[in-house]
Amino acid sequence: MNRVVSRCNPPSYNWVGQYQGSGNAPLTAAYNAADGQSECTFTVSPVSIPIFDSPFSLSTTYSHATGFDSAKAPYNTLNVADFGQTGSTAATIVDWMGRDKSSGGFMNGHDGHDWFMDRGTPIRAVADGIVVMARDWPSGATGSDSPDQKEVAIEHTVRGTAGSTYVEKFVTYYAHFQSYSVEVGDVVSKGQQIGLSGNTGSSSGPHLHFSVTRKTNTANALSETVSWFLPPTGHSNSADNTIEPYGWGAPSGFDPWSWRGYPDGVLSIALWNSGQAPSTGTW
Ligand SMILES: [Zn+2]
């Protein structure tokens, strides 16, 4: 099952199409519908690539705090009716089901998921990969265990079947470790312990922050680089190609970042293996 977002007529990109179907069907439909428009971009994406296991044992005692806000700045008000939901026509926080979370006490502009858990909980690589960042990031935060936020990022590569040139690359980011046990260049396996959860950096209580960046097949590039934004500016809205690892599951419409994030839109993909998605509680 694939999704296609077509956008035409730059710089306004005022002609947008969203198509879903099997195999090449949505791309064919998008291409035919765009006949007569100018300078169209077609962004194609599988709905699901199940490659992630949970970053912690699901028998751990944990609770979800806040998730991936699809109403990211500068497109930070959305009409949830576009997604088949009831609620605000100017929702400032929208979850992966297109639901209005503006009044739930969740964090605005958050680019990943936070799960509260005890300090010292083993944290694991969600898939095979290569460590691309492991550092003590001087957040300047006060009130946590250390202003230096201990954090790790791992790059994961998925290739098409033999003979195909299709490739996807994702970077997973884990923050607020008490300690981490990998360094840049390490090859890690799915399920391998990479550190212990904690409360370092910009953190109001012991928790794991987990987010996913999609490097490939964004609206404006086959492959993008990930910047670690030095000097640090905080991780919310840090990159326009962070995605929702639960995918986009609203009754109608597409991931708003895939068609509103001009020119850098990117489609979210459901990445959890069966039975491996941690609970998101009331998110
Ligand atoms: Zn967070």
Image (cartoon, grey):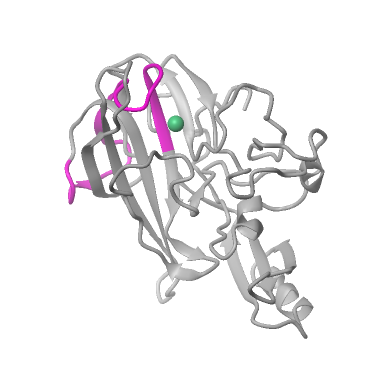
Left or right: 198 in relation to 209 = left
Residue 59 in view of the camera: no
Q: Which of 154 and 270 is in front in this view?
A: 154
Identify the image quadrant of the N terminus: bottom right
Q: How many numbered badges does the structure rendering display? A: 0
User: Magenta residues: mostly which secondary structure?
Assistant: loop
Q: Nearer the viewer, residue 230 or 1?
A: 230
Ligand 1 shows up in the quarter that is top left
Image quarter for residue 96? top right
Q: Is residue 45 magenta?
A: no
Image quarter for residue 21? bottom right
Residue found 57% across the figure and 33% down from its top: 108
Residue 26 in view of the camera: yes
x and y, in percent, of residue 179 in the image: 21, 26
Residue found 68% across the figure and 70% down from its top: 13
Residue found 69% across the figure and 53% down from its top: 254
Residue found 61% across the figure and 43% down from its top: 70
x and y, in percent, of residue 87 in the image: 80, 33
Image quarter for residue 117? top left
Q: Is residue 208 magenta?
A: yes
Residue farthest along the bottom direction in this orientation: 36
Left or right: 207 in relation to 262 = left
Bounds of the magenta segment: 183-210
x and y, in percent, of residue 118 in the image: 35, 14
Left or right: 83 in relation to 143 = right
